[in-house]
Image (cartoon, helix red, strand yellow):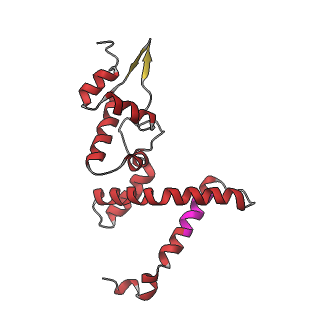
Amino acid sequence: MVSSHGYTIEELSSAIGMSVRNIRAHQTRGLLPAPAKSGRFALYGPVHMRRLEQIASLQKQGFNLVSIAAMLGAGQEPQETGAACPEVMRAAIDMAAAGIPLPTALRFLAQAMDSVIPVAQAMADAHAERVPVPYSEEDFAELLVSAFRVVVANRPENRIRPRAAAG
């Protein structure tokens, strides 16, 4: 044992039941924050353990690492509660309030993000080259949301039958 202030990567690996290689891979992907340094040792704490437990649980539910990164707000320091990314949780809660079970809502959001992220990135790149008026990132995100709403509202099946008649 190196210190009472944390776990070495080997100790964390043993405690959580995940390989050292996977722990390092999660850290490289931004899913896990960097450990604290104590001399030449890297020490992991309870925040790291909770985050790895969340990752393992979400993987068992069928989520891929891209979706998990979005849900957990990868690249941000994890909160002590281990809460998911606020925007994703807000959307999931809204869907749950509409009657969609929370696991189903999270799975749908993960799949939607997997599909939409490349399109949004392409649109952002095109925007930077073609639109002379600079938008803030937040304004551009609102523009994308508005465009998405127009596309969804104008799907052929929405034009064929009124929403109230759908069943």
Left or right: 149 as drawn, with respect to 80: right
User: Residue 16's spot in the image, x, y percent?
Assistant: 26, 30
Q: Image quadrant for the N terminus?
A: top left
User: Residue 112's spot in the image, x, y percent?
Assistant: 42, 60
Q: Is residue 15 above or below residue 76?
A: above
Secondary structure character of the magenta stretch overall: helix
User: Residue 120's spot in the image, x, y percent?
Assistant: 55, 59
Q: Which residues are magenta?
A: 139-147
| Residue under the image location 50 percent in, 56 percent down | 117
Pick whichever, 50 or 63, lies toward us: 63
Q: Residue 41, located in which quarter of the rendered image?
A: top left
| Residue under the image location 42 percent in, 33 percent down | 27
Is residue 44 shown in magenta?
A: no
| Residue under the image location 37 percent in, 35 percent down | 80
Is residue 140 shown in magenta?
A: yes
Pick whichever, 125 or 85, lies toward us: 125
Q: Residue furthest right?
A: 132
Residue 82 in sight? yes
